[in-house]
Amino acid sequence: MTRRINVLTDVVANQIAAGEVVERPASIVKELVENSLDARASRIEVSLLRGGKSEIRVSDDGIGMGREDALLSLDRHATSKISSSSDLASVRTFGFRGEALPSIAAVSRLNINSREADQAAGTRVGVNGGRIEIVEDSARQRGTTVEVRNLFFNAPARAKFLKSVSVEVRIASDVLTGLALANPRVSFSLTSDKRNLLDLPAVDDAVARISQVWGLDQGNTLILAGAEDPGLEVKGLIQRPDAAKPGRGRRYLFVNGRPFKAPKLVQAAERAYRTTIPREARPWMFLYLQVSPGVVDVNVHPTKAEVRFAQDSQIEDLVERAVWSALDDQRSSATLDRELETPHLLVQEPKQGQEVAQPLSDAQMALFVAGPEVEDVAEGQLVGNPEDPRPNLWQILNTYILAETRDGILIIDQHSAHERVLFQSLMDAFEEGGRDGQKLLFPLTIRLTAPELKLIEELRGLLDRSGFEVEPFGGDTVILRAVPNPHPYFNAERAFREMIDELTHGSELVRSAKNQHEKIAMTFACKGSIKAGQQLADIEMQELFDQLFSTDLPHHDVHGRPTIIRLSAGELARKFGR
């Protein structure tokens, strides 16, 4: 009988495994830099030639390896990170599979040059397509350098799938950036064809690292966010709504210090932004999750870019709550200040000399050492404590209200502010079953188009619960018998017509709503609120001010525009040279 099943050689098996781990140069950068971080390096240098197709070089000043460990690291499933299956429940290192180096070596020409601090000489190991060809002493400082040349030289079909040099460089840079954001106290550099792309000296906190990568102007648009449940914590930085722009938003997620991808968590954060930003805006977010062992499984994908949570919905709710709470705080409002108070979010590193492969203590598991801004995120209210007198208010240009606070001046857009008030009021009314409108002494007869009549029939119950009592009156006409009464200047007929037109034909505002209740509330808030140019009495300004700050998210209107712009006393003093 002919035997059809054969055992693959180690070389072939490693090439197959490499297909899971080594997708492109960025995959190698990720694996090698993670090894450097596990080796407690304080400086990591990465260089690429031709986008990594010709050469990838990663050098660190970590603990290094002796000759025996350097050779063992090239065996599949050889690792210093775990020793039993039970260790997988509390993996605190980046690497643990023992697959990266042999997989990389199988599809490249690899050199490892490493030295431990107590060794007289280092060790150099040369590997060609998975076969060890050189083992010799080398002169070098403590640490490890790995050089990967001629990637996929023995797998040309794989090489064809690589993108252009510029694309491969960009992807590798993104990978390194994520690891740098997770480890701000480590110095990173990246060069491509001897051109310096990243030079990130070690810093104390995440905001400083973000400012290094994207500039201080972007760092100043970020505010602190945080929430926690038993065994779960999320803290991070999100972008102020007024600074969120269309395009590519920077979204980085970390769990127990490990970068990962989770579209559902990003969507949860975006849900919290609803009604505070335009639909097309993409706010930046950097969210760090800290979870107890057993809550997260990092052993679900060879690249470790994905994780699995035991409580997906709870994590999503926690992220949404953290972002929403930050947006409810005054720090999320737009500002005219150029010199802003910088938030601090410190990432705690393992102590020097500690074996990082061991489970960390409860104290070491605390990812964050927060500055006072984190603890005081709900403080700094606009008008001080209840014993303080009410702020002085002035209307200017019949459009804006100036409010003096203990910290400076607030500029309130009366139309946007009233939008938020009316939206909150109607959404609360929907939760309580609706509200009655005010009966009109002379009901309004209104002619509408066929699509508008159809819409009214579909939404008649919701319109009634929002205070609009509408009845068919034959043909293309309806009769409006009752309407809400949000303010003395309310033009019921105009507001009703504009609402129905927008609901029928759609708009960015309507499309951003998550359900019909929200569509009605948004359009009513927009069309029924006090307009710009309307003069207000002192008591009306005070009532609007008080109502605004009793709403959720008072600093943003339903279009995603600011209701308030802050101007601090310090900024005023700087303008006048004080």
Image (cartoon, rainbow, N blue to C red):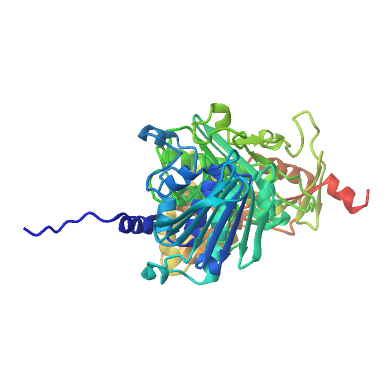
Pick whichever, 412 or 574, lies toward us. 574
Q: Could one spot residue 284 in this view of the protein?
A: yes
Pick whichever, 507 or 570, lies toward us. 570
What's the residue at 37%, 67% (across, down)? 155
Count of marks placed on residues: 0
Give the x, y percent position of residue 322.
57, 40
Classify residue 561 as left or right of residue 534: left
Compared to 337, does 197 lie above or below? below
Give the x, y percent position of residue 490.
64, 54
Give the x, y percent position of residue 219.
69, 52
Q: Could one spot residue 530 in this view of the protein?
A: no
The quadrant holding residue 216 is bottom right
What's the residue at 31%, 54% (across, down)? 10
The quadrant holding residue 108 is bottom left
Pick whichever, 44 or 10, lies toward us. 10
Residue that protrudes farthest toward the left in the picture: 1
Pick whichever, 221 or 303, lies toward us. 303
Q: Quadrant of the N terminus?
A: bottom left
Compared to 426, does 524 lie above or below? below
Classify residue 326 as left or right of residue 91: right
Classify residue 367 as left or right of residue 74: right
Compared to 161, does 344 lie above or below? above
Give the x, y percent position of residue 293.
45, 32
The quadrant holding residue 552 is top right
